[in-house]
Image (spheres, rainbow, N blue to C red):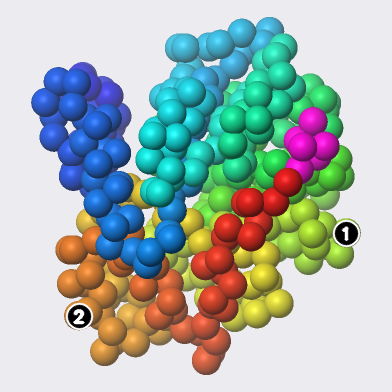
Amino acid sequence: MQSPLNPGEYARRLFFLNAGCVNEASGSVDQAYVERMRNLVDGLRPGSKLLLLAFERSYSEDAKPDLERTAFWVPDAYARDIAKAHPRYFEWAASIHPYRPDCVEALQLAKREGARAVKWIPSIMGMDPASSRCDRFFAAAAKLNIPIISHAGLERAVLGGNQEYGNPLRLRRALDAGVRIIVAHCASMGQDIDLDKGENGPYVDSFELFARLFEVEKYKHRLFGDISAMTQINRAGPALARVVEREHWHARLLNGSDYPLPGVMPIFSVDSLVSLGLVQASAAPVLKDIRAHNPLLFDFVLKRHLRSNGKALSRTVFETRKLLAQG
């Protein structure tokens, strides 16, 4: 990501650094990023915290770390230590690959050390959530009552990987094992094979597959959706409108920021949301001013202003602590 010879990754890094308001000075990027997050939280309602997400390496089929296919790596210990150093600002989530020989022990340790959840992007981590190789991890997660925040649908923020692993229907195995699953972004981008019609079934919107699972009665207390990133240009539209309108979903939806992406100017457009009828035109100038001041506050206020057919997101969507503090 630091070489212009890889222009796609190089540009991504610059976008993320710019969005996080960090400088390029050697050795200062991590510290500046954390300080920027603390500054933004100070601009939120007292008591608000950010959940810091660790991110596991990719693993090969023989259960060994595969650095050649690892897009990035944020060790559990790093997220844990930052959260412990600043408990007024942060909680943390572990990231543990279920193919690891020590995955259960790693999960037990993370739970003891205060992890609120486990973060996955299956397509990037090189793991199939529908594989029996995950079963012992699922059994441990269910016993420990720790949720898995799993990306589903198309992954575009990070390049590479096997997009098929992001199919929402592949999360059924975890749900049937009793694991609480939080589907990132409500799988609101891309298409996946409708596996209910076979391995060669038709491609349908990933959000439709998520919605199918979300309506299953037996998953009512296990399956949740995270609305982070759903106001981005490439996600806002019918899926966002349906999430706002389906009031019976709201008790199982959680707000997330997807930070630092709210600070990446090209991928958010208040004017686009106004044109879609999801935000009133009168709110646009204030929202734009807030964004220039504090992208986290902008993300929150923007979602509170969403409207579709007279419906708005319930305040419970923004009260995520009750779910993440369980267990």
Q: Is residue 47 magenta?
A: no
* Residue at mark 2: 285
Give whichever of 184, 101 is nearer the camera.
101
Give whichever of 101, 198 is nearer the camera.
101
* Residue at mark 1: 218
| Dot 1 alpha-carbon crowd within 10 angstroms: few under 14, some 14 to 19, many 20 or more | few
Total number of numbered discs in the rendering: 2
- What's under tag 2, amino acid-wise? Pro
Residue displayed at 82% across by 37% down? 143
Left or right of 73 on screen, residue 204: right
For the question of whether residue 22 can be seen, the reply is: yes
Quarter of the rendering containing residue 3: top left
Residue displayed at 83% across by 32% down? 139
| Range shown magenta | 140-145
The secondary structure that dominates the magenta segment is helix
- What's under tag 1, amino acid-wise? Lys
Q: Is residue 144 magenta?
A: yes
* Kind of element beneath mark 1: helix
Residue 186: image x %, image y %? 59, 57
* Kind of element beneath mark 2: helix
